[in-house]
Amino acid sequence: MARVLVADDESAIRDVIESTCKLDSHDVRSFADSREAIAGYAEFRPELMILDVNMPGGGAEAILESVEAALGGPACPAIVVSGYASERLDHPRIVEVIQKPFGIDALRIAVKTALGAAT
């Protein structure tokens, strides 16, 4: 179906996101930190990113800004996962914020919606 890049420093969250996306036949690459995710973006060319809002080395917004600077243009859409209900994010490529802990159904719906919006 789609190429999905996952970046989260919590291995349990990363594993749940990856497994859920693979259930829907997506090709998934997962990274534990922002530096790896930024490098992986160029190689993998995802159609969607699912990013933790806060990670060592920079979270979702830092990843998006770095990818866009390297590309010289917009990155693919991103879903952001956050453990903070009041998290304020303001990047045009962020299409949805999912509150941790999240249910698998909520994640699947968000991915489907984000990929639909990207086409």
Image (cartoon, helix red, strand yellow):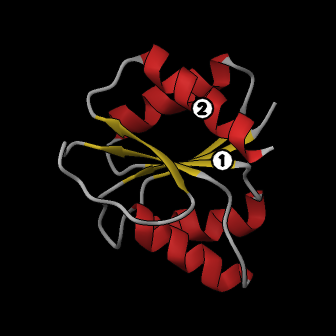
Crowdedness of circle 1 by 10 Å Cα count: few (<14), some, many (20+)?
A: many
Give the number of callouts: 2
Give the image location of residue 115, x and y in percent.
70, 38
Give left or right: position of 87 versus 17. left
Reading the image, the residue beneath label 1 is 48
Spot occupied by residue 45 in the image (x, y as percentages of width and height): 77, 59
Q: 102 above or below 60?
A: above
Q: Which mark is residue 34?
A: none
Secondary element at tag 2:
helix
Percent coordinates x, y for residue 84 in the rendering: 18, 46
**Residue 30 or residue 62, whichever sits in front:** 62
Q: Which one is earlier in the sequence, the residue at label 1 or at label 2?
A: 1
Mark 2 surroundings within 10 Å by alpha-carbon count, few (fewer than 14), some (14 through 19), many (20 or more): many
Q: Is residue 75 above or below residue 11?
A: below
- Residue drawn at the location 22% of the way across and 42% of the way down: 83
- Residue 18 visible somewhere in the drawing: yes
Q: Residue at x 57, y 60 (%)?
A: 93
Q: Would residue 50 appear left or right of 52 to someone viewing this image?
A: right
Q: Secondary structure at mark 1?
A: strand
Label 1–label 2 contact, CB within 8 A: yes
| x, y percent for residue 103 | 37, 18
- Please indicate whether residue 32 sits to the left or right of residue 42 in the image: left
Amino acid type, label 1: Leu
Could you tell me which residue is drawn at 49 percent across and 31 percent down?
17
